Image (spheres, rainbow, N blue to C red):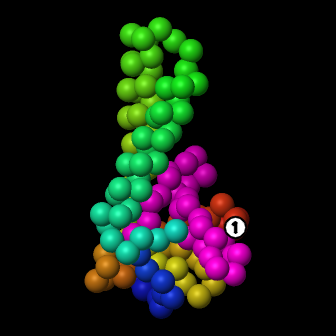
Amino acid sequence: MSKPFVRTGWANVTDTLCGPFVPLETDEHGESRPLLFDTQAEAEKERVDYIEAIMEARRLDCDADEGELEALLEAEQESIEAAEWVCFAGVDDAGGVYELSSPEGLEIVRQLQRSDRVLL
């Protein structure tokens, strides 16, 4: 099943207990919209930067000895990397976001969630 999309691009997705979420950005009119990148490489770089920032914050916040700290951080990084991924996505005219099969196929794989909306 496919539908018309007003925007497509590469998205970073966070898999949570409530489902997969896409990050949002604010457009020039102050409206929230899904953050999409023009290339997969840009999205992958953003994913890596995000994970590195989280890990640096964890390193600063963690109160453990050096040996224990490295083991804790390694486990934390594996968990974060498993929950963060990149996919091709499309946004419909109502602002719904969908993971798509490919840039060429545009077949819907599943709907992604936005933190500013509740899926029913």
- Which quarter shows the N terminus? bottom left
Q: Which residues are magenta?
A: 10-34
Q: Is residue 19 left or right of residue 37?
A: right
Neighbours of disc 1 within 10 Å: few (<14), some (14-19), many (20+): few
Between residue 101 and residue 74, name the one nearer to us.
Answer: 74
* Residue at the spot 64% in from the left edge and 79% down from the top edge: 28
Is residue 16 part of the magenta span, yes or no?
A: yes
The picture places residue 70, in percent across and down from the top left corner, at 39, 19
Q: Is residue 84 visible?
A: yes
Hey, what amino acid is under mark 1?
Answer: Arg
The picture places residue 35, in percent across and down from the top left corner, at 52, 68
Is residue 78 part of the magenta span, yes or no?
A: no
The quarter of the displayed image where residue 120 is located: bottom right
The quarter of the displayed image where residue 80 is located: top left
Q: Is residue 92 left or right of residue 11?
A: right
* Residue at the spot 63% in from the left edge and 84% down from the top edge: 94
Between residue 116 and residue 46, name the one nearer to us.
Answer: 46
Main secondary structure of the magenta stretch: strand
Q: Is residue 111 visible?
A: no
* Residue at the spot 42% in from the left edge and 70% down from the top edge: 37
Residue pointed to by mark 1: 117
Q: Is residue 110 above or below residue 45?
A: below
